[in-house]
Image (spheres, helix red, strand yellow):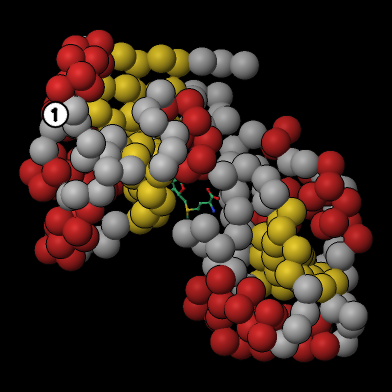
Amino acid sequence: TGCLYLVGTPIGNLEDMSVRALRILKEADIIAAEDTRNTKKLCNYFDIATPLISYHEHNIEVGGEKLLAFLREGKTVALVSDAGLPCISDPGADIVEKAIEQDFPVVPVPGPNAAISALIASGLTPQPFFFYGFLNRGKKERRQQLEQLKKRQETILFYEAPHRLKETLKDMEFILGNRRIVLARELTKKFEEFLRGTLAEAVEWSQTEEIRGEFCIVLEGNENTEEENDEQAYWMTMSIVEHVD
Ligand code: SAM
């Protein structure tokens, strides 16, 4: 019977491809990819000859129907996105729901994820955490979304495009007030770096810097006790730590 595998792929460093993920991609009847050109490069690098078909947010209906047809024919479908885990701020959730409805097994093949990688190295409280993903692009909607997050006590994880980071940080400071923040840039890549400091410092930094690369935002929750406020002194000078493997 057909089976849908959800396969994690690297978020930058190809060495993060798991042995199991490679085997599943090689053995699958078809790889459904967010961007076939992108995944073709990954497949070439790892000598994977499995046929590719595209499945992205603009063909969720038609693409999804094709994938379900493969599953009904008893085929194995491996779903990948451009980077990291499918379904996490990436296409996948729709086909997962439909595959489950039609009683096909859905099997996760874990792999890299930008938000969790940022969280574990952030130094902020790792749990409980709240994964938000992308905020809305519109200023008004974004501010409304932040307003709803104001009282959350969990560490909050965001994705953001580099060209929107400056505005997003400003809105965060405006709505949420000053708190600790960690910007994780270019995770697993050559110029990976962590900017750890306060939101006010991050806003200041973003004014002067030309912002390039991929970013995850890890933001402290609203849980400041007296004790924690004292502890903050340690964070007050924004530190930048670069690391190359
Ligand atoms: N599915 C992916 C995952 O599991 O992490 C996330 C895909 S989402 C469309 C892309 C966003 O993830 C980027 O805008 C950025 O915020 C974050 N991201 C992806 N790769 C990253 C990296 N190497 N370093 C920092 N952030 C990254």
In the current view of this chain or complex, which residue is farthest to the left? 174
Q: Is residue 57 above or below residue 159?
A: below
Q: Secondary structure at mark 1?
A: helix
Q: Is mark 1 within 8 Å of ligand 1?
A: no
Who's the residue at 26% across and 62% down the image? 136
Q: Quadrant of residue 219?
A: top left
Residue 71: % across, % down:
80, 82
Q: Is residue 132 visible?
A: yes
Residue 215 vertical position relative to residue 200 in the rendered view, above or below? below
**Residue 43 position within the rendered picture, expressed as x and y whole percent measured from the top left:** 78, 52
Q: Nearer the viewer, residue 222 or 64?
A: 222
In the picture, measured across the screen, residue 172 lies left or right of residue 190, that is: left
**Residue 116, placed above or below residue 59:** above
Expressed as whole percent of the image width and height from the top left, the position of residue 139 reads 15, 59
Residue positioned 27% across, 43% down in the render: 153
Identify the residue at horizontal 15%, vertical 22% (top origin): 226
Residue 150 on image: x %, y %: 17, 50
| Quadrant of the snapshot with the C terminus | top right
Residue hosting label 1: 200
In the picture, the quarter occupied by the N terminus is bottom right
Please name the residue shown 52% across and 62% down the image: 90
Three-letter amino acid code of the residue under disc 1: Ala
Residue 131 relative to residue 188: left or right: left
Residue 211 seen in the current view: no
